[in-house]
Image (cartoon, rainbow, N blue to C red):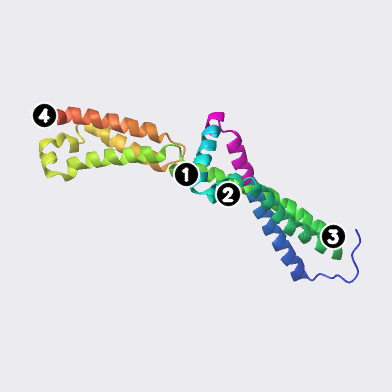
Amino acid sequence: MSATPGIQLTAWEIGLWALLLTCAVALTVQMLRKGLAEANSDAGSSPGALVLHGRDLQRQELDDPEAVSGAVTEPDALFWNTFAGLVVIVPAVLIPALASPAVGLLLLALAVAAAVAAFSGGRKLEEIRRNRPENRPGFARTAAQHDALVARWQEYELDPGKSIDFPEMCDARVPQTAALVRALQEAERCRSTPGTDYPRAVEQLAAAMVAAEAAAGVQAGLAR
């Protein structure tokens, strides 16, 4: 492709096209990656779940037809996002290429590099997001159980009556209480540390709580 006479690009214009191209490619790749991931997730749903989802849509259609229409046409967003990205990307490469084929090739290479960087960067960010402790499966339920156990243990420290009746619950020299303190520390560590078995740590905390209360005679004391 030879340069088109009459079309000249200054350095700042080339930089502007490069910036526009990089942003358009990065956004388009991210939207495509997200859309394909959601499509694959929906395709992996069980037939039973799909049937139930269809029934839910039928029931919802009676209450909110516009919401159901938006949910049904959601896959079209992938096409339109791609189309919108290409509307910006193609001219951002072709127009400078008409002025200078070398600049066009440079921008094309920049577009490929931006696409690769956006895809790999998006995957890394998604992996980081999935590995966040609060995003682990069942985290909310486990955290609620953990908080309840911590509050249960704190009652023996903050309630004067329980502190007097069951002093062993605050005495780390008692083996069961020492084990409870270690279980509390381990559960707290697993709560905020990625890659740890938080549910198992909370289960062990619950078992340690029961053992410490039994050693302190909590059940016998409450029965009196």
> What residue would you read off at disc 3?
102
Q: Quadrant of the N terminus?
A: bottom right
- Determine whether, in the image, residue 141 is placed left or right of residue 177: right
Which numbered disc flags the more N-terminal residue, 2 or 4? Answer: 2
Q: Which of the 4 image quadrants contains residue 204?
A: top left
Question: Distance between the Cα atoms at labels 3 and 1?
Answer: 45 Å
| Circle 3: residue type | Ala
Kindly report which numbered mark, 2 or 4, lies closer to the viewer in this rendering. 2
Q: How many marks?
A: 4
> What residue would you read off at disc 1?
132
**Proximity of marks 1 and 4: CB atoms separated by less than 8 Å:** no
Question: Distance between the Cα atoms at labels 2 and 3?
Answer: 45 Å
Kindly report which numbered mark, 1 or 2, lies closer to the viewer in this rendering. 2
> What residue would you read off at disc 2?
70
Q: Which mark is residue 223?
A: 4
- Determine whether, in the image, residue 48 is placed left or right of residue 81: left
Residue 192 drawn above or below residue 210 = below
State which region is magenta: 34-49
Res 220 seen here: yes
Res 171 seen here: no
Image coords of residue 219 (percent x, y): 15, 29
Mark 1 residue crowding within 10 angstroms, few (<14) / some (14–19) / many (20+): few
| Circle 4: residue type | Ala
**Proximity of marks 3 and 4: CB atoms separated by less than 8 Å:** no
Q: Main secondary structure of the magenta part?
A: helix
Q: Secondary structure at mark 3?
A: helix
Question: Distance between the Cα atoms at labels 3 and 4?
Answer: 88 Å
Q: Secondary structure at mark 2?
A: helix
